[in-house]
Image (spheres, rainbow, N blue to C red):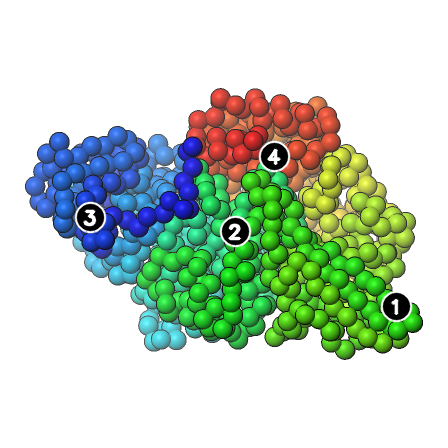
């Protein structure tokens, strides 16, 4: 059926304890010599050696120093099969590969003048013959040979182990990686790279050289990333007791990169957008994203590399855990509440939709056709939420002990989610067998909470019912253990301290653990009906249903001390007003009052106020609808924004002006917060009066990219006078910088108007269109399909047809990028007619026209 099944896992019949690779690097044709020590697993005798190998030109094959006769091996273009060995031997192959032709960016490829690799998940088989699976973990010796002038810098995994000059202007560098490492973490980078560097001593006393490398003048924009590496390294020492384990940590910035970054052992390779930054060219959001991605990749050194995966079904074991760790890093370094808001926005806008749509899957799927299609929000973000739930259930102290145990028990091993849970169960003394359901069950759990207050006795009960909707292939769901945090407020806003009577166990950090489908919490003798607030800090990744009216939510937003919840209550008011789940007028008035009070409150963190002004986005609102009427939803949202902006025009002007000084340069928290709120105010003010010159003035006088881009967005999106001139100026000034060029392109592609498709047509006909560059493709097609509901969901279906046509074209260039674009259709079945029909037609038009496994798998899942 084309699927790989979790239940079919079998350990490798042959192990590879040590691998030596020698590369003769050239752009057009590189020759790779691989010398592999192969040892049979004594528990599984009698198997042929079967190695993966794709698009390799096999030049030589030898075993134990002698050529291997042709009747002992067979290569069918996917697998190299070698027969007749029953005991350990050394295999040597030489193969030719063609990096310059590799537009898939999997394996060894060229990015401008650089040679780079991307091996996760299954790219190593495009470099040499190998058992390309994560539970084969040799130690490595890597020799790189290349022309010195074209490739003066030769980097690979591990520690440097010597260099020498060769004849003909060539040179050689050797690297040794002493840690058992699967081949998906293999990497090389070669070319004219320059670095910023810093040497430090780890808590264990090891001297480590940190280097961040980029091409040419880009190196001056690597300092922030270098600082982020050091911050991540220190944080992992302090928070998780994990030290770095090699003599060097190299990071390389690449302009052509399919995803965000890659945690190769000792040699992380990054999409340049997550490395290069200065205030002139990068926004505050970019800086925070860089820090968080740098930390994510660094933190993988323990959660992923030292402890790796048994098989790809366990992907969330490294990705969910590492997202959990990187969000903790960001929360510890900056604002915990703002980080939580950022994460929950992403969950609600994207992960909840994924978990309810055609592509829904469990955090640990039990089958896949193409593993590249499982680098999803569910594996990453929901996976991280599941780890957070575990921490809440066992308590922070036991969780840390469980992490120590997990790392200690599994160091140097290829682990499973069971190993992770076993370590936590042992350290906390908890039975985590029910908890394992979080990994097996798709769908976002819902908590339906109903209240009953008996005036006579003062008894108050909350009944909590848990329910997870069916998802493709999973009709029936079991209850999931999770924390329920709550606070009861008296009518005057005072907190009611009394603990409830309940069968739900109390939790270490407050609240109770929900362990069954239904629980009842009972308070006795309350003097008045209380107002409950739930899920402080979004402790459980659920949808919470409770019958609030607008006045309740407004009161709670004043009473609640948890900042995440204060933000969330305003989001609820806004969604209620927009989706008519609350009385729209009452909700709008209550929201307007709350936002007015926030705008008046100069003591409130301006970054928090900016978050409150950012109403739920289109995706979040659509996710909450059973049937999505795009135009109606967008229209309601626009008119709510218009009304609120009108109501608060003076306040917005006051805050915009009063924050001017604070919003100057610098990456301090107050300056960033001031810029965030100023940009939010500017957007509301420009909406009210696009003719006003405020945005033009901000654009003209901006000293940071945050201010400049904030102004450009207002001008372009509200079609203000000066938009074309600003766009032209921006375009010219940054023409040589691909990352900044992506910014104006994304700004154009997200202009909320059906006509934007015409602008995109012009872009595609221009020299700005670079279909082999994933960042550019995402800026144009990704932004249009994911951040422009009025464009993508045009009633005539032209938006869908455009994206489908691009998917078909890009499939022949970079299938992983093409497949990701198809994800924009994941909720097509919820669209109101005629859009649903149009979306189906666009998808159906692709049938029989796609060639890669990546896009074919996604298309089939979308249409099944
Ligand atoms: N672990 C990395 C995953 C990744 C990747 C996967 C498929 C194709 C290309 C890729 N580049 C990077 C990224 C991370 O989560 O750290
Ligand atoms: Zn990762």
The mark that comes first in sequence, 2 or 4, is 2
> Pointer 3: what residue?
45
Residue 467 horizontal side relative to residue 462, left or right: left
The mark that comes first in sequence, 3 or 1, is 3
Q: Distance of mark 3 from mark 1, alpha carbons?
A: 72 Å
Q: Is residue 298 visible?
A: no
- Name which residue lies at 64% across and 50% down: 468
> Pointer 1: what residue?
454
Q: Disc 2 vs disc 1: which is toward the camera?
A: 1
Q: Disc 4 vs disc 3: which is toward the camera?
A: 3
Question: Is disc 2 in contact with disc 3, using a CB cutoff of under 8 Å?
Answer: no
Q: Could you tell me which secondary element the residue under label 3 belongs to?
A: loop
Q: Could you tell me which secondary element the residue under label 2 belongs to?
A: helix
The crowding category of the residue bearing disc 2, from other C-alpha atoms within 10 Å (few below 14, some 14 to 19, many at least 20), is some
- Name which residue lies at 64% across and 71% down: 505
Cβ of mark 4 under 8 A from ligand 1? no
> Pointer 2: what residue?
440
> Pointer 4: what residue?
825
The mark that comes first in sequence, 4 or 3, is 3
The mark that comes first in sequence, 2 or 1, is 2
Q: Distance of mark 4 from mark 3, alpha carbons?
A: 47 Å
Q: Distance of mark 2 from mark 3, alpha carbons?
A: 33 Å
- Percent x, y for residue 581? 82, 48
């Amino acid at each position: 059926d084309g699927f790989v099944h979790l239940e079919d896992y079998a350990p490798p019949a042959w192990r590879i304890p040590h691998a030596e690779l020698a590369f003769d690097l050239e752009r057009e044709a590189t020759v790779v010599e691989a010398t592999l020590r192969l040892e049979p697993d004594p528990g599984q005798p009698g198997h042929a050696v079967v190695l993966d190998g794709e698009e390799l030109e096999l030049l030589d094959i030898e075993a134990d120093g002698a050529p291997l006769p042709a009747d002992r091996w067979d290569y069918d273009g996917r697998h190299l099969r070698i027969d007749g060995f029953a005991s350990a031997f050394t295999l040597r192959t030489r193969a030719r590969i063609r990096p310059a032709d590799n537009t898939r960016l999997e394996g060894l490829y060229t990015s401008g003048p650089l040679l780079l690799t991307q091996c996760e998940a299954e790219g190593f088989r495009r470099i040499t013959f190998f058992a390309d699976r994560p539970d084969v973990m040799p130690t490595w010796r890597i020799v790189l040979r290349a022309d010195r002038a074209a490739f003066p810098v030769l980097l690979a995994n591990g520690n440097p182990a010597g260099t020498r000059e060769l004849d003909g202007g060539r040179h050689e560098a050797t690297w040794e990686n002493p840690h058992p490492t699967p081949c998906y973490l293999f990497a090389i980078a070669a070319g004219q790279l320059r670095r910023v560097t810093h040497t430090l001593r780890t808590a264990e006393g090891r001297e480590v050289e940190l280097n961040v490398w980029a091409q040419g003048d880009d190196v001056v924009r690597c300092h922030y990333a270098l600082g982020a590496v050091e911050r991540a390294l220190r944080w992992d020492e302090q928070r998780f007791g994990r030290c770095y384990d090699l003599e060097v940590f190299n990071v390389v910035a690449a302009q052509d990169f399919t995803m965000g970054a890659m945690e190769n052992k000792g040699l992380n390779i990054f999409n340049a957008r997550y490395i290069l930054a200065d205030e002139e060219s990068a926004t505050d959001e970019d800086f925070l994203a860089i820090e968080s991605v740098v930390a994510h990749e660094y933190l993988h050194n323990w959660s992923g590399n030292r402890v790796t995966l048994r098989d790809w079904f366990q992907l969330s074991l490294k990705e969910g855990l590492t997202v959990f760790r990187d969000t903790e890093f960001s929360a510890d370094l900056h604002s915990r509440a703002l980080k939580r808001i950022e994460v929950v926005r992403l969950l609600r806008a994207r992960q909840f939709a994924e978990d309810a749509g055609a592509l829904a899957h469990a955090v640990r799927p039990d089958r896949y056709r193409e593993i590249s299609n499982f680098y999803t929000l569910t594996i990453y973000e929901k996976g991280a939420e599941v780890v957070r739930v575990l921490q809440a259930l066992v308590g922070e102290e036991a969780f840390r002990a469980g992490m120590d145990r997990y790392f200690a028990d599994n160091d140097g091993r290829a682990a499973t989610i069971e190993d992770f849970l076993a370590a936590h169960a042992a350290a906390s003394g908890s039975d985590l067998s029910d908890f394992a359901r979080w990994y097996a069950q798709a769908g976002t759990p819902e908590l339906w909470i109903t209240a009953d207050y008996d005036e006579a006795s003062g008894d108050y009960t909350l009944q909590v019912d848990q329910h997870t909707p069916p998802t493709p292939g999973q009709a029936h769901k079991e209850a999931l253990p999770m924390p329920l945090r709550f606070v009861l407020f008296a009518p005057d806003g005072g907190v009611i301290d009394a603990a409830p009577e309940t069968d739900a166990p109390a939790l270490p950090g407050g609240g109770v653990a929900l362990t069954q489908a239904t629980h009842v919490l009972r308070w006795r003798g309350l003097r008045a009906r209380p107002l409950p607030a739930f899920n402080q800090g979004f402790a459980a990744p659920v949808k919470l249903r409770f019958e609030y009216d607008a006045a309740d939510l407004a009161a709670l937003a004043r009473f609640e001390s948890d900042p995440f919840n204060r933000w969330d209550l305003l989001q609820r008011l806004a969604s209620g007003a927009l989706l008519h789940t609350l009385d729209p007028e009452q909700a709008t008035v209550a929201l307007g009052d709350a936002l007015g009070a926030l705008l008046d409150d100069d003591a409130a963190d301006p970054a928090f106020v900016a978050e409150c002004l950012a109403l739920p986005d289109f995706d979040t609102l659509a996710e909450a609808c059973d049937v999505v009427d795009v135009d109606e939803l967008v229209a309601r949202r626009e008119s709510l924004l218009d009304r609120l902006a009108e109501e608060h025009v003076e306040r917005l002007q006051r805050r915009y002006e009063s924050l001017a000084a604070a919003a100057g340069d610098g990456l301090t928290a107050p300056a960033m917060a001031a810029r965030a709120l100023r940009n939010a105010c500017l957007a509301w003010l420009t909406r009210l009066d696009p003719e006003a010159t405020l945005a033009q003035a901000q654009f003209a006088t901006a000293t940071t990219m945050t201010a400049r881009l904030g102004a450009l967005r207002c001008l372009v999106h509200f079609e203000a006078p000066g938009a074309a001139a600003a766009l032209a100026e921006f375009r010219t000034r940054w023409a040589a910088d691909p990352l900044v060029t992506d910014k104006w392109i994304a700004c154009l592609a997200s202009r909320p108007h059906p006509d934007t498709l015409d602008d995109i047509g012009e872009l595609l006909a221009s020299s700005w269109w670079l279909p082999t560059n994933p960042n550019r493709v995402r800026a144009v097609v990704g932004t249009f399909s994911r951040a422009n509901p009025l464009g993508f969901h045009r009633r005539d279906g032209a938006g869908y047809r455009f994206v489908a046509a691009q998917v078909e074209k890009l499939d022949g260039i970079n299938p992983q990028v093409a497949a990701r674009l198809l994800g924009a259709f994941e909720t097509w079945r919820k669209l109101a007619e005629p859009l649903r029909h149009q979306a189906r037609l666009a998808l159906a038009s692709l049938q029989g026209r796609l060639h890669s496994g990546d896009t074919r798998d996604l298309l089939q899942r979308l249409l099944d």
